[in-house]
């Protein structure tokens, strides 16, 4: 078996995603495409517009062989931990030869060189990062600025200047860092992204992003959305109008019902942001109002949205840190019916494989919190999207 892994959200799957999957298979010579997909919530702190099982089914029908869930704890994490969780999940599968992803630069060697610099982190670079952090920048921006300055000072790294200035490059480097730190023998395959970036809201370009599609749906511009996604995807989204009002109501209720001291216990709360959130929640009536009032230079909108999810789901600092130490587990969402050989290989390599929610009773006890969190998140999304679809077991496609 020759597996190429793809880390994805497919929120929703676009024509660009479909092109990537096809190129990943042909250019790496893979006989198996493994998708590790965010479940009910995504890395920017947003709710997915479709149930994870529906998105997994679409992926298999359009070319994937198996789709497994990226555990919620990692799916709503900053880039480095998002990547750590995804690579950890991939490590459960034997015979993974490639990780494939899109990037702005489209240059695997350049991304590899950047990751190797960061994993070794010479003293000069470490000091530059600290200097940038003192200026009040958030860590990703501080690190990018430090790497750019380091590249200017050291001619052998001149080519990597600007690599960390774009989001998909940053995520790609995070994946390579996770692979290096885990000591895995996985090769990198990347294709140059065409059209919009992952958060580009322009729909009138060759390869619009998922963000652009969601924005078109919110504006009820279904004609534009139809051009940006495969016909199968449009069949599922043609009547959708993304609405985060329910999520905002849940978060505001939670913030209003706990005190500032309790807020300090949640993951990624630091620098007095709990006070800003508490003050903002006192007068806010919607989630956008809350976020706008609480954001700072150091706390970006995406980071604040993730923090709100940690609060909603009771993800404390202690629970998060313990989760990082847990053994790997694999929750299978969908698989091509004729590819049960993948399950056999996986079962021989990983002790904690789930194909239905009741399997929570037989996995390692340390994992039960994480598995239950995934299903709590699914139930929450069910409320947000007013969906009557609530599957609890693997789909055979």
Image (cartoon, rainbow, N blue to C red):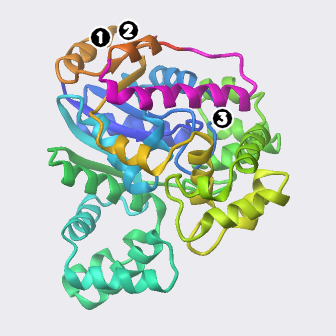
Q: Residues within 10 Å of mark 1 (few under 14, many from 20)?
A: some
Between disc 1 and disc 3, whose residue precedes? 3
Q: In which quadrant is the N terminus drawn?
A: top left
Quadrant placement of the C terminus? top left
- Residue 347, compared with residue 97, is above or below; it is above
Query: Disc 3 to disc 2, how far (Cα)?
Result: 26 Å
Which region shows up in magenta?
A: 363-391
In the shown orientation, is residue 347 left or right of residue 359?
left
- Look at the numbered discs 1 and 2 and tell me whether their residues touch, using CB distance below 8 Å: yes
Q: Is residue 65 above or below residue 273?
A: above
Q: Is there any visible trace of residue 103 in the rendered image?
A: no
- Gap in Å between the C-alphas at discs 1 and 2? 6 Å
x, y percent for residue 345 = 20, 18
Q: Pinpoint residue 55: horizontal percent, then vertical percent.
A: 55, 27
- For the point 77% across and 39% down, the residue is 243
Residue 256 appears left or right of 361: right
Say which mark, if any, is on residue 337: 2
Vertical arrangement, residue 290 with respect to residue 343, above or below: below
Viewer can see residue 354: yes
Which residue was labeled with disc 3?
A: 49
Q: Residue at x 37, y 56 (%)?
A: 80
How packed mark 2 is, by other alpha carbons closer than 10 Å (few <14, some 14-19, many 20 or more), is few
Magenta: predominant secondary structure element? Answer: helix
Residue 153 image offset from top left, x and y in percent: 26, 91
Q: Nearer the viewer, mark 3 or mark 2?
A: 3
Relative horizontal placement of residue 238, taking residue 25 as reference (left or right): right
């Amino acid at each position: 078996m020759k597996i190429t892994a793809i880390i994805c959200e497919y929120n929703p799957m676009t024509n660009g995603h479909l092109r990537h999957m096809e190129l990943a298979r042909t250019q790496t010579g893979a006989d198996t495409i493994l998708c590790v997909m965010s479940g009910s919530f995504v890395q920017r702190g947003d709710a997915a517009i479709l149930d994870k099982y529906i998105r997994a089914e679409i992926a298999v029908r359009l070319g994937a062989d198996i789709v497994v869930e990226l555990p919620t704890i990692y799916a709503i994490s900053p880039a480095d931990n998002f990547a750590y969780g995804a690579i950890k999940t991939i490590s459960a599968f034997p015979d993974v030869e490639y990780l494939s992803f899109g990037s702005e630069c489209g240059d695997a060697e350049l991304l590899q060189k950047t990751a190797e610099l960061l994993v070794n982190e010479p003293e000069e670079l470490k000091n530059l990062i600290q200097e940038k952090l003192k200026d009040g920048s958030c860590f990703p921006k501080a690190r990018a600025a430090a790497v750019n300055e380091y590249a200017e000072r050291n001619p052998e790294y001149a080519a990597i200047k600007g690599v960390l200035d774009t989001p998909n490059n940053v995520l790609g480097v995070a994946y390579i860092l996770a692979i290096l730190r885990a000591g895995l023998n996985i090769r990198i395959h990347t294709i140059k992204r065409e059209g919009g970036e992952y958060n580009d809201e322009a729909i009138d370009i060759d390869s619009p992003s998922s963000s652009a599609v969601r924005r078109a749906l919110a504006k009820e511009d279904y004609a534009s959305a139809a051009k940006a996604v495969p016909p199968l995807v449009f069949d599922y989204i043609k009547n959708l109008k993304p609405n985060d009002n329910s999520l905002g109501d849940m978060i505001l209720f939670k913030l209003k019902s706990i005190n500032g001291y309790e807020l300090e216990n949640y993951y990624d709360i630091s620098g007095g942001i709990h006070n800003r959130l508490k003050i903002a929640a006192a007068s806010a009536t919607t989630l956008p109002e809350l976020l706008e009032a609480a954001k700072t230079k150091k706390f970006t909108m995406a980071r604040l949205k993730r923090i709100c999810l940690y609060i909603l789901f009771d993800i404390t600092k202690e629970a998060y840190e313990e989760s990082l130490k847990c053994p790997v587990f694999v929750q299978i969402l969908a698989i091509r019916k004729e590819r049960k050989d993948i399950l056999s290989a996986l079962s021989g390599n990983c002790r904690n494989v789930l194909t239905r929610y009741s399997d929570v009773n037989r996995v390692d006890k340390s994992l039960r919190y994480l598995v239950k969190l995934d299903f709590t998140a699914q139930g929450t999304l069910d409320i947000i999207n007013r969906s009557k679809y609530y599957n609890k077991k693997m789909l055979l496609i």
